[in-house]
Amino acid sequence: MRCAYHPDYFVALPATHPFPMAKYPLLLEALRREGLVQQGDLIEPGEACLADLRLVHDDDYLDRLAAGTLDAAAVRRIGVPWSPALWRRSRLAVQGTLEAARAALEDGVAANLAGGTHHAFPAHGEGFCLLNDVAVAIRVLQRDGRARRALVIDLDVHQGNGTAAIFEGDPGVFTFSMHGERNYPLQKMRSTLDVGL
């Protein structure tokens, strides 16, 4: 199975930070150890281009991300300190999801070993998510005529509030979220189908 991965999916965070950034290289190690991924299966993505990101995200938000001019409240909402490496990492992960989606259309199945940043909205990030990789991949595939409709199945313990908000009312994208009802985010958005447990 082809998998998108880049060494820069890992960005060093303060030692006390709760986000487990080391999970990305550890996942690759585990897949290699189990023989599930060989070197030839890896797709190394570049950074997603701004034109693709603009299919989902607002120009002002992208400009502030690129320049590192998010205000303190915006950085707190995201939950990770902004850095050029984090901006690059976020664009790599978006492109990784897009490359995995393209590979899945060809092979039937593929994966990105990062991504799933379902808390990112068009004009802001939150919950450790800067850019919504799934939404960008869907919009690029639609733009390029590779997909007319899409189904997002989100089984994270947290509702995919950013993804739900982006696609709310869009008949071409069905969003399904099964999540912990009493977990983050406190204010849920409306997916096409939400199952709160």
Image (cartoon, grey):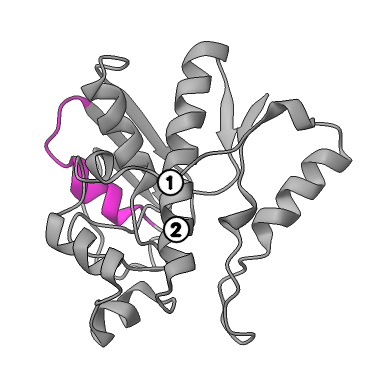
Residue 167 magenta-highlighted: yes
Give the amino acid type for the residue marked by disc 1 in the picture: Glu
- The mark that comes first in sequence, 2 or 1, is 1
> Image check: 127 left or right of 171?
right
The residue lying toward the viewer, choosing from 79 and 6, is: 6
The image's mark for residue 193 is none
Residue 94: percent from the left, percent from the top?
41, 45
Please report the residue visible at 43 percent of the width from the left and 56 percent of the height from the top. 90
Q: Residue 193 appears in which quarter of the rendering?
A: top left
Query: Is there CB contact under 8 Å for labels 2 and 1?
Result: yes
Q: Residue 170 appears in which quarter of the rendering?
A: top left
Q: Does residue 197 appear in the picture of this structure?
A: no
The residue lying toward the viewer, choosing from 152 and 104, is: 104
Quote the CA–CA distance across marks 2 and 1. 7 Å
Q: Residues within 10 Å of mark 1 (few under 14, many from 20)?
A: some
Residue 120 magenta-highlighted: no
Magenta stretch: give its range: 159-172
Q: Residues within 10 Å of mark 2 (few under 14, many from 20)?
A: some
Residue bearing mark 1? 47
Residue bearing mark 2? 88
Give the amino acid type for the residue marked by disc 2 in the picture: Arg
Vertical position of residue 33 compared to residue 111: above or below: below
Q: Does residue 10 appear in the picture of this structure?
A: yes
> Image check: 23 left or right of 31?
left
Vertical position of residue 59 compared to residue 187: above or below: above
